[in-house]
Image (cartoon, rainbow, N blue to C red):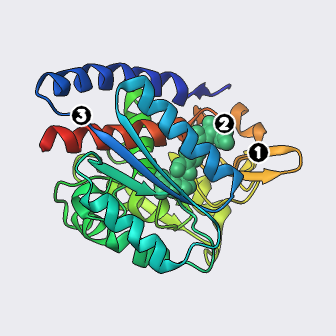
Amino acid sequence: MTATILDGKATRNAIFEDLRVRVRALAARGVVPGLGTVLVGDDAGSHSYVRGKHNACAKIGITSIRRDLPAHTTQAQLHEVIDELNADPACTGYLIQLPLPGHLDAGAALARVDPEKDSDGLHPMNLGKLVLGETGPLPCTPVGIIELLKRYDVPLAGANVTVVGRGVTVGRPLGLLLTRRSENATVTLCHTGTKDLTAEVRRADIVIAAAGNPALITPDMVKPGAAVLDVGITRTDEGLVGDVHPGVREVAGWLAPMPGGVGPMTIAMLLTNTVLAAERS
Ligand SMILES: Nc1nc2c(c(=O)[nH]1)N[C@@H](CN(C=O)c1ccc(C(=O)N[C@@H](CCC(=O)O)C(=O)O)cc1)CN2
């Protein structure tokens, strides 16, 4: 068996087409969405993702607002920039690129963002809304994963989903999203304390690997025909490596590879959140 590829780039392009139409409709109402980014420091990956976000804005007709700060930025200086974007009417939504340098408190920064302008869905109030099932912006990677699965008709209702990784941007919110009535999956959330990872992965209909541990998921761990989504990105001297061993392609029924699977969906969902917020305004 060779897996059907869940093509994140093609899906992202289709979403961008739809967003372009919606942005034109907003313009006719005199509404121009403006996405801001706050980037602190010199991390090469973060710079590349922020560049990708602004390139995507240009393709769709969203105004870009960029705040790049040096690595030695203090918490107070970061908060000043956040306050400025909260007050800027041209900035209808924005995000703080993660990770922040170690001396900064990401939680305090995220909590200071105006929850109405939280394009990433990572403000504590919006994460609380997710727990309560209330409407609000949703974290981009988890909602991108669900969108990708749905667009390829991967059955979710009643599926056993094993999520590997309990981070705040992917694993934890993904568990909440997948167990909503509209998705109805049964979720096992695995982490470094999980006793038998192989057994948890082996019984899953859908495996989502977001641990940042190269080739953690090997072919022998995967149930034949399962859907496997690789969310891990590790930068090595040989290039980028995902959490899923390349041999999994021969066992899985569907595969979202890294690169080209979930990553492009993250940016598509960010711009979707930005357009949705402008439509609600
Ligand atoms: N504030 C946020 N910070 C971070 C998020 C996030 O959603 N909000 N997610 C990641 C980084 N990220 C977007 O910010 C992101 C990661 C990967 C990709 C992507 O398209 N990856 C490519 C491969 C990697 C590459 O080419 O460098 C792919 O999978 O095809 C897009 C966005 C952490 N920080």
Q: Position of residue 95 (x, y in %)?
A: 41, 55
Task: Tell me, for residue 73, which label it has, or none.
Answer: none
Q: Secondary structure at mark 2?
A: loop
* Residue 205, above or below 104: above
Q: Are marks 3 and 2 in contact (CB under 8 Å)?
A: no
Which quarter of the figure has residue 240? Answer: top right
Kindly identify the residue that appears in the image at 77 percent across and 38 percent down.
247
* Residue 28, above or below 125: above
Q: Which residue is mark 3?
A: 32
Q: Amino acid at mark 2?
A: Pro
Q: Which residue is mark 1?
A: 240
Q: Nearer the viewer, residue 167 or 100?
A: 100
Q: Is the CB–ligand 1 distance for label 1 below 8 Å?
A: yes
Q: Position of residue 280 (x, y in %)?
A: 13, 43
Q: Position of residue 99 (x, y in %)?
A: 58, 64
The answer to whether residue 207 shows anywhere in this view is: no
Q: Are marks 2 and 1 in contact (CB under 8 Å)?
A: yes
Kindly identify the residue that appears in the image at 16 percent across and 59 percent down.
134
